[in-house]
Amino acid sequence: MQELAPSAHQAPIARPLRAAAPSSPLRGTVTVPGDKSISHRALMFGALAVGTTDITGLLEGEDVLRTAAAMRALGATVDNLGQGHWRVAGRGIGGLVEPADVLDMGNSGTAARLLCGLLAGHPIFAVMTGDASLRKRPMKRVTDPLSATGARFTTRAGGRLPLAVEGAADPLALDYVVPVPSAQVKSACLLAGLCARGVTRVVEAEATRDHTENMLRHFGAVVDVQVEGHGRVIELLGQPELFAAPVVVPGDPSSAAFPAIAALLVPGSEVTIQGVGMNPLRAGIFLTLQEMGADITETNRRVEGGEPVADLVIRASALRGVDVPALRAPSMIDEYPVLAVAASIASGTTRMRGLKELRVKESDRLAATAAMLVANGARVEIDGDDLIVHGAGGPIEGGGLVETHMDHRIAMSALVMGLASKRGVTADDAAFIETSFPGFASLINGLAGAEPIAAP
């Protein structure tokens, strides 16, 4: 069994890392960890299905391991067979059991919010907590709509964890308009709708990642999706019989963005990343980079488990500033910090619009991203919910210490920036990278044939 990180009530030891420009280009062929969003959902749907679900390519970072532990606590049999291969023996819709202890979700906001939906439809009592970072993040965005099912939630002030839920014995179907683009809120409502009679209807004004809808169909649920303008209307027929189905987890596009941008920024580099999920509702970062002049080629396109997949060949490129529309934000919301790094080294100005959602991630990622760049000599402005980066047209000065705020994406972005800097960049704590990208520093160092990322 894979071991978890220390309990949420123990402060992990800070692990600073420093990245400097490598002495040679990045070269090689790599894979990145399995898609985190799909990994969480594969475990949850496996627990709700009848039969045994075989999962390959599962991300074995701490966030996903918390979901695996939670599914065990709720009565599913979850076995790790080694190297991303897992099996889940499910309990069927409505069959989850009351956990004997608090569910500790570590640093995973996705797991916590989706689990709220899962628990809302079961007549059981559960308490959920997380680490110091997760306990600061708001849950009202999911508990408010889920309360309409008949479930009762009790939280700390501001809707924060720890959270107690009493699921509904006879949950009501929801008809909910999501106020801001959020795949987590949409998915939580659909998960609750699995246990409700009738049709659960979720309306989103802007389309968000659709892994939940794809996986619902994969496991046998009836899901209807209608496109309306830039958004969609999703209808789920409640109380389906979900049947175990094999899941192949593609490489996480959010994780692939970090070695991809490193390859774009380090002169002479050429890197191939195999098996990357290319769902169009997730691939906004690659479209944006290509608009900036990035040399990115998709090869070996295929479909695995209902998700489009491709191998990406990335070659070092001179990038230029662009205007990134707000409508693209849901398809690349986690990649803005590392995109901002690319923008700081590009020629011209890049404006990233509509980044309100970044303020409620593991940290206030909008402020943290701006601070990361400023600490290393970049010119940056925040205008409302827009981030404006004035590119240096070459390597950034560097030399700064980046406060990561226990946010894995800020830590990885800082290290990528260090690779394209004159004086190197230090992340004050890179321990949290393991929650989503185990072995990140080793992967980059392997491509460099040296150790540009090391302890300071």
Image (spheres, rainbow, N blue to C red):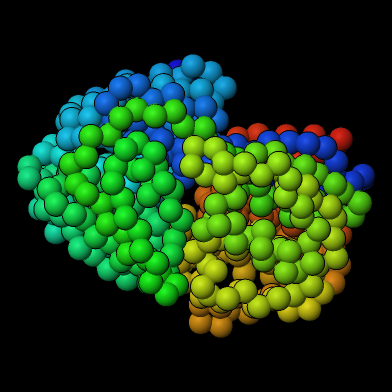
Q: Is residue 101 left or right of residue 282?
A: left
Q: Is residue 234 left or right of residue 419?
A: left
Above or below, 324 against 313 in this view is below
- Can you say whether 63 is above or below 347 in the image? above
> Does residue 138 appear left or right of residue 321 in this picture?
left
- Judge whether residue 456 can be spotted in this image: no
On the image, the x and y values in percent for residue 2 come to: 48, 22
Name the spot of residue 409 as percent of width and height, x first: 58, 52
Dividing the picture into quarters, in which one does residue 128 lie? top left
The residue at the point 75 percent across, 75 percent down is 321
Estimate the x, y position of residue 225 in percent, counting from the top left.
35, 58
Quarter where residue 381 is shown? bottom right
Instruction: Name the residue at 53% across, 18% down.
Output: 82
- Looking at this view, is 400 or 361 the one in front? 361
Give the quarter of the image for residue 51.
top left
User: In this orientation, does residue 193 appear?
Assistant: yes
Residue at figure coordinates x 71%, y 41% from the top left: 300
Locate the C terminus by quadrant. top right
Residue for point 40% across, 57% down: 183
- Residue with the most extreme bottom position: 383
Q: Position of residue 4 (x, y in %)?
A: 45, 28
Q: How many marks?
A: 0
